[in-house]
């Protein structure tokens, strides 16, 4: 079913191309593309496709849809996507502000969640979150993490804890800071924030884009013998 979303067709095209089983390295490069933008124009303010705003419109927009999928879940997201295509198949959806509001309303109605905060962060600003582990506490049977974000984003976040005996994945909602306490059977070895690359993070990519992808040597972070990885 065809639907014309105006220039918002472009981020949807980038997103749908990502559904064909992108590898972790490909996701990391996509994240690096987003972070390479020097333009501070929010998607909501982009009127035409041009070189300066290309990255924000195509790659940030596409990744924002991936993040929305994570926020509301696969089944709800794809149900909303089908509803959007059905509505815009017969309706003019080429006005940026009206279409963003329509997209938000469709996903809110289907998910039962308010999503104004999400759209404000990803479509009405051009910044990216900065997740980090600021401190941790170890006991013989538990790990407590203080996870922070200093760019004003409120987002759910996956946290993977790798121990000598098990891998544990938890989901938290982070708004400024959050404390996560987990009982562990083995010695904690590594903590990975956003292990599946659902959200673009300021320090989340191992690549930098300078005409081509360049792999960088990222400084390793350790706290009390536990390796911290920002994905």
Image: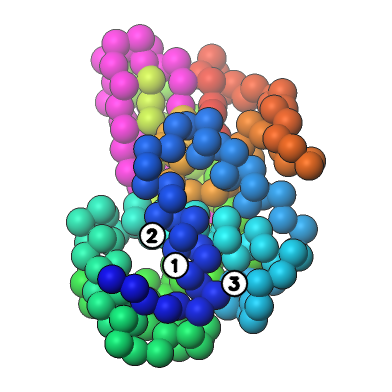
Q: Is the magenta stretch mostly helix, strand or loop?
A: strand
**Of residues 162 and 8, the one drawn nearer to the viewer in this rendering:** 8
Element type where label 2 sits in the image: helix
Crowd band around label 1 with a 10 angstrom C-alpha radius: few (<14), some (14–19), many (20+): some
First reached walking from the N terminus: tag 2 or tag 1: 2
Q: Distance between the residues labelled 3 and 2?
A: 15 Å
Provide the residue span drawn in magenta.
163-191
- Residue of label 2: 68
The answer to whether 28 is drawn above or below residue 64 in the figure is above
Label 2, label 1: how far apart the Cα atoms are? 8 Å
Q: How far apart are marks 1 and 3 (CA)?
A: 13 Å
The residue under the point 52% across, 36% down is 26
- Picture coordinates of residue 6 (x, y %)? 50, 79
**Mark whose residue sits in front, 2 or 1:** 2
Quarter of the figure that contains the N terminus: bottom left
Within the magenta stretch, is there residue 180? yes
Q: Residue at x 64, y 81 (%)?
A: 47
Task: Classify 10 as above or below 71.
Answer: below
Residue under numbered circle 1:
118
Residue at left offset 46%, top offset 41%: 197
Image x and y of residue 66, in percent: 41, 54
- Closer to us: 194 or 107: 107
């Amino acid at each position: 079913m065809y639907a014309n979303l105006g220039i918002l067709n472009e981020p949807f095209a980038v997103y749908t191309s990502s559904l064909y089983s992108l590898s972790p390295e490909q996701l990391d490069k996509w994240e690096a593309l987003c972070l390479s933008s020097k333009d501070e124009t929010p998607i909501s303010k982009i009127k035409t496709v041009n070189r300066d705003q290309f990255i924000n419109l195509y790659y940030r927009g596409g990744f924002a849809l991936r993040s929305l999928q994570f926020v509301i879940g696969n089944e709800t997201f794809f149900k909303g996507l089908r509803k959007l295509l059905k509505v815009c198949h017969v309706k003019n959806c080429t006005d940026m502000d009206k279409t963003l509001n329509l997209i938000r309303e469709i996903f809110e109605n289907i998910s039962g969640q308010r999503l104004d905060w999400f759209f404000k962060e990803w479509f009405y600003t051009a910044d990216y979150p900065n997740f980090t582990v600021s401190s941790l506490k170890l006991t013989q049977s538990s790990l407590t993490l203080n996870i922070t974000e200093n760019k004003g984003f409120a987002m759910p976040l996956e946290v993977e804890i790798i121990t000598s005996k098990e891998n544990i994945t938890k989901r938290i909602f982070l708004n400024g800071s959050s404390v996560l306490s987990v009982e562990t059977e083995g010695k904690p070895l590594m903590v990975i924030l956003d292990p599946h690359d659902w959200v673009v993070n300021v320090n989340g990519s191992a690549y930098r884009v300078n005409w081509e992808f360049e792999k960088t040597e990222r400084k390793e972070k350790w706290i009390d013998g536990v390796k911290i990885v920002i994905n």
